[in-house]
Amino acid sequence: MERRDFLRTGLVTAGGVAAGAAGVAKVSSSAEAKAAAAGPGAATLALTADGELVVAPARNGATAVPTSAEARRGVPGRRWVMVIDLASCDGCGECTQVCAKSHFVPGDREYIRLFKMRESADTAPYWFPRPCFHCDNPPCTRVCPVGATFKREDGIVLIDNERCIGCRFCMAACPYSARSFNWSRPDNPTAAVTRGYSPEWGYPRRVGTAEKCDFCADMARDKQLPHCVAKCSMGAMWFGDENEDAVTNAKGDTVRLTTLLRDRAGFRYMEELGTKPRVYYLPAANRRSAAPGEPGANTGNLQRRGDQR
Ligand code: SF4
Ligand code: SF4
């Protein structure tokens, strides 16, 4: 069953389910009971195309599904930007894990991959988190034959899986290998289905489509930090608006973007490619934690993807 077909039936909330769903399909009284037991507003009932009701936790405060035009335009007046402080990253992998959880990312991929980097045998290694860079000159969007992947006014690069035809040109064009592909029919959890699809969050997934880090475009629209930035207990990830010249980390510190980049010698990965990433890095000088492999060093999420480091 495709997502479009599924969503045709729409949603009803716990409070109004009995009247709304009665007569439409075989209503599950146990599902109603579960939703009612969860309390008003705590659960949502979704009517599947098979005519069954399933219970999903309500996403209190979740962003309403933006229109297609809104999702393609972005938040007016904003230019979202991310800064990753390699001196502060201790390789714990919290960013990768919370990203996977909040986007229902299947276990065979990661939107933020954590690499162990080393410039030479004489220098200490360091951790290097790599999301999609939301390039200002993105080779991925130029090769898409159907306009499924696009660059917004606010700087975010997204994929619309309702348009994606699965050609994977974008994957070949991205020099950072930031994209993944849904080779088989995804096992979308109920919570992913009930929210409704938007390119701003990318789920529920569809077989034969590309996907990647979306900078948590829905969170930005809600004036919240992306999940990875909010979860980074080291305060190593910053997010903000280039137009306001301000970025904020999980510790609640807000600094001027230009000052941070100037004072800490900020750089962009593989700048020479001309892709103009919207993710800046601060060098791993004077690290605040042990280098990978040193006594007391974090192992990141090596146990999940030991092949990439
Ligand atoms: S990192 Fe890759 S997928 Fe992301 S915007 Fe740049 S070229 Fe496109
Ligand atoms: S895989 Fe989808 S998003 Fe990527 S280039 Fe092809 S149609 Fe466009």
Image (cartoon, rainbow, N blue to C red):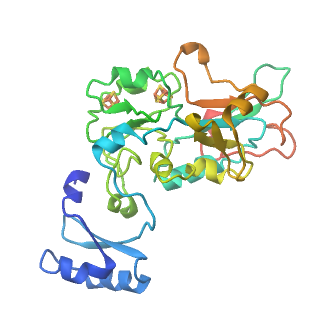
Residue 46, above or below 286? below
Residue 136, above or below 8? above
Picture quarter containing residue 172?
top left
Name the residue located 82 percent from the left edge and 30 percent from the top edge: 285
Towards the viewer: 293 or 49: 49
Towards the viewer: 181 or 133: 133
Q: Quadrant of the N terminus?
A: bottom left
Image coords of residue 34 (percent x, y): 37, 82
Q: Quadrant of the C terminus?
A: top right
Name the residue located 61 percent from the left edge and 34 percent from the top edge: 308
Name the residue located 29 percent from the left edge and 41 percent from the top edge: 69
Left/right of residue 7 with respect to residue 81 in the rendered view? left
Image coords of residue 31 (percent x, y): 31, 80
Left/right of residue 205 with respect to residue 285 in the rendered view? left
Image coords of residue 212 (percent x, y): 45, 38
Residue 218, above or below 260? below
Q: Is residue 2 among what the camera can see?
A: no
Towards the viewer: 176 or 70: 70
